[in-house]
Amino acid sequence: MPDLTPIADPAACVTGPHVRFTILTERLLRLEYSPTDQYEDRPSQAFWYRQQPVPQFSSKITDKTVEVETEFLKLEYRLGQGGFRRSTLSIHLKQSGKTWRYGMRSKGNLGGTARTLDSIAGKTRLEPGLVSRSGWAVVDDTNSLIFDPSGWLTRRSTSGNIDLYFFGFGNEFAECLRDFTKIAGPIPLIPRYLLGNWWSRYWTYTQAELQTLVEDFRKNDVPLSVCMVDMDWHVTKTGNEASGWTGYTWNRDLFPDPPGFVSWLHNQGLKTALNLHPAEGIYPHEDQFAEMAFFMGLDPAVQKPIPFNVTGRRFMEGYFNILLHPLEKMGIDFWWLDWQQGSKSQMPGLDPLWALNHLHFQDLGRDGHKRPFVLSRWGGLGNHRYPIGFSGDTIIRWKSLSFQPRFTATAANVGFGWWSHDIGGHMWKEGSPELYVRWVQFGLFSPILRLHSSNMPELDRRPWSKPERYFQAAREALQLRHAFIPYLYSMAWRAHQTGLALVLPMYYGDVSKAAFACPDQYFFGTELIAAPVVKPARSRKGSIRQRVWLPKEAWFNFFSGKEFRGGRWHTIRATLEDIPVFAKAGAIVPLGPKTGWGGVGNPKTLDIYFFPGTSNRFELYEDDGETTGYQNGEYALTVFTLEKTGSVLTFKIEPVSGEHSLIPAKRQYRLHLRGVDASVTCDHPSTYDPDTRTLDLEPVELTPDAGLSVIFQNCS
């Protein structure tokens, strides 16, 4: 467990008979009622860091009332009326003039996320989020479990208590997530390699077949960063009553040399993970059965299966130390936890998925050096601390794809930003090549791009298996994904620092009516809006027309440079090769060079695309990509700025701050001012591309301690 600070500063607490109100921030209050005046100060499943700087507030306590007031909220509680009731407890939101009363349900809650999209074709119901159009949301933490001093979950000892968290943020949705992650813990900084392309498939691969597949990706100039192995890595024909879904023993018929195979993947520059279905426990056919039985105090000669028990400390210690750690020592980089076996455990109130996500995350980071994470389904509030989300086995339909932009963006409302979908869809009848390409293009502009499908022979996610035009479009998107890693990784750093996910709903930037009416598009980082095509074309040429809403100010098509006025809807025509993505005025977007392989590390060459219209600043974040060294300041920041003065635009690259050894000793910068006409000039050799309305500057090589300034004239 990390070092937690669950006890709030006493100066932030206001108490009265049977009540305690904690002012966590000026807009986030903890509301507790206890008939015995015994309150819970231990960390709960969701809330770990209640010790925060004491906000500015005032309080007044009389024999009849308790009042608490911050800059944004005013709480009133009437004493002696039987505890929390609609008539006794209210909070007034000063900015909106709205008042919450105990027991009220939030109207217009904007949703959070859902456990899984398993077997879903289209929409599914979302759990409530932390933001709403009413301006407030309440989290009832009364029945959640708490952590004891040893870091193990247990039930609360207080009976009859009420424990609520009131989020009163009005339309300041970003501030809500910032404060939530202060109290619940930050979104972890994920390893850099996770932002590249992943391959996985539910298929009985042999070691040789998987190696050939990886080689084919390389031959076809389609880059990968992760190769996952689904459940057939282990023995599935067990010879006993076990179904074969759970397993920890390599299938040597398929993988005769597991260490050699894992080493080979690493030599190709790939990371790897194995699929786990732990629900059935450990059966006698497992290589580790005897050791695990002895560890559990059982006689292995009895040949009795060892049941899975996520609540048992001894069992979980053996689960990690005996079953998983030897595989990690072999080189397995992380785990794909494929839990689908219910929500009940031996401890009432404990969802085994929640516990597994928490324990897997903590265990992978046990040495304090490796960045932990787990690929798993959403387990509930607080699971933003355990990326990456695995959204499950979707049905291959256009309506499945069309729901995923909304599903991904809305998850930001509970901080769960790192969703990984089955790109291409998982099961049933294969879709058209057009559906495949559009899904891959969405994957390019989604948090994690993981190609996947079930074990039906006709389901093929290899890009070169598609007709030529579709192959070319898919490969372009997959190559672009690796080029986008510098931008994506900077956004991963922002998510860690601020609680704001890479993908955000449009209402995070504008709360006009239109912002709530465009679920197919979203902010993609600080600079871009993505509106991927999620419906089939109706024209013979394969193009589609779709409506896109752009907020106020000017916007530019990221690829063509065409300018659009903001604050209105636009009809966009997109061919199969087109992905509607828009850069804000003044946007600065650093990309690596397009490549057919690799491209995951800190690049020696950077393409900086920037757009006219206004001043702006962008921080490129870089570190070693995998360790926790960044927590000790081991990272580098390169600042790019745009300064607009009249028709003059000045672009600057500042000297790198931080740890220079983490980035190339010399880096080539290729600057591209996009969205301008041919009249724009600059004080540096350049050429103009009318097709993309781009002024391309000749490359400049800089050392980390050097800077650059370029002046552009005639920029409107």
Image (cartoon, grey):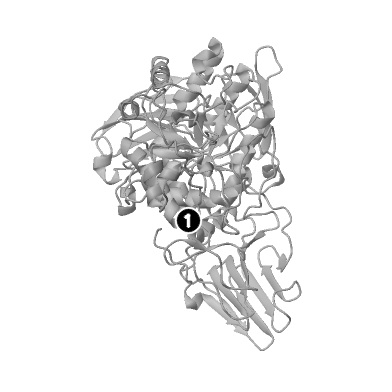
> Does residue 498 appear anywhere in the picture?
yes
> Does residue 640 appear anywhere in the picture?
no
Image quarter where the N terminus lies is: bottom left
Q: What is the x, y in percent for residue 2?
A: 40, 58
- Front residue of 366/547: it is 366
Residue 560, above or below 707: above
Q: Residue furthest bottom?
A: 63
- Front residue of 216/235: it is 235
Q: What is the x, y in percent for residue 651?
A: 39, 37
Q: What is the x, y in percent for residue 388?
A: 49, 42
Q: Quadrant of residue 18?
A: bottom right
Q: Residue furthest right?
A: 87
Q: What is the x, y in percent for residue 407?
A: 63, 40
Q: Quadrant of residue 669?
A: top left
Q: Amino acid at mark 1?
A: Gly
SS at mark 1 in the image: loop
Residue 4, above or below 569: below
- Front residue of 274/715: it is 274
Q: How many marks?
A: 1
Residue at the (59%, 16%) spot, across then down: 458
- Front residue of 303/712: it is 303
Q: According to the image, label 1 marks what residue?
A: 312
